[in-house]
Image (cartoon, rainbow, N blue to C red):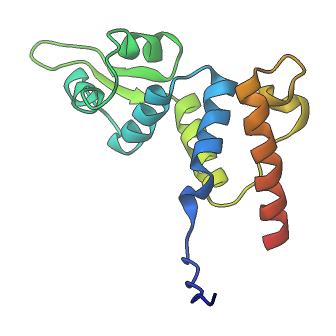
Amino acid sequence: MFYRERPKPPKDYLKYWRIIKKYVQTKHNLSSAEVDTLLFLHSENYFDRDKFQEFNELLSWDKQRFNKLLREGWIEIFRKRTGKYKTLYELSYKATNLVQYIYRKLEGEELPTGNWNPMFLKNASYTDKVHRNMIISMNKEIKSKK
């Protein structure tokens, strides 16, 4: 049987998105919704709780999501409430670095293997072990493209 080969897309950022997201979740103890929230807020510069809630409504219900992100240092207060002005928040340096890290990995940087990656520890869960096999495969493909 003959088939026509499709041209490869010029950018293929999302091919390994699930693996990269799982790695970030495992390493930083974040839920999928929390990672999505940080990605959304990254372009917002400053935001209030209403802006946070606007995106939060699209995600699974978690009443404590905002407080957890604030408590763990992913979100910081930019300006406290004064008079009629609401409290404004911003992503912390830690969160901004994490988002930039995600983008670098999506652009083709390899994921770490070994002890730097909690998915490669001996006591890793079955799910982590399955994902680490894919990380190895992904890294091989990235190396072969270079």
Residue visible at 84% across and 64% down in the picture: 143
Q: Position of residue 38 (x, y in %)?
A: 45, 33
**In the displayed structure image, the side of residue 46 where residue 31 appears, left or right:** right
Q: Is residue 108 above or below residue 3?
A: above
Residue 23's quadrant in the figure?
Answer: top right
Q: Position of residue 70 (x, y in %)?
A: 44, 15
Residue 1's quadrant in the figure?
Answer: bottom right
Of 50 and 30, nearer the camera is 30
**In the displayed structure image, the side of residue 28 where residue 47 appears, left or right:** left
Residue visible at 85% across and 30% down in the picture: 120
Residue visible at 60% across and 86% down in the picture: 5
Q: Is residue 28 above or below residue 135?
A: above
Of 53 and 19, nearer the camera is 19
Residue 2 visible, this angle: yes
Of 12 and 133, nearer the camera is 133
Residue 146 visible, this angle: no
Position of the C terminus by quadrant: bottom right
Q: Position of residue 142 (x, y in %)?
A: 78, 63
**In the displayed structure image, the side of residue 7 where residue 122 appears, left or right:** right
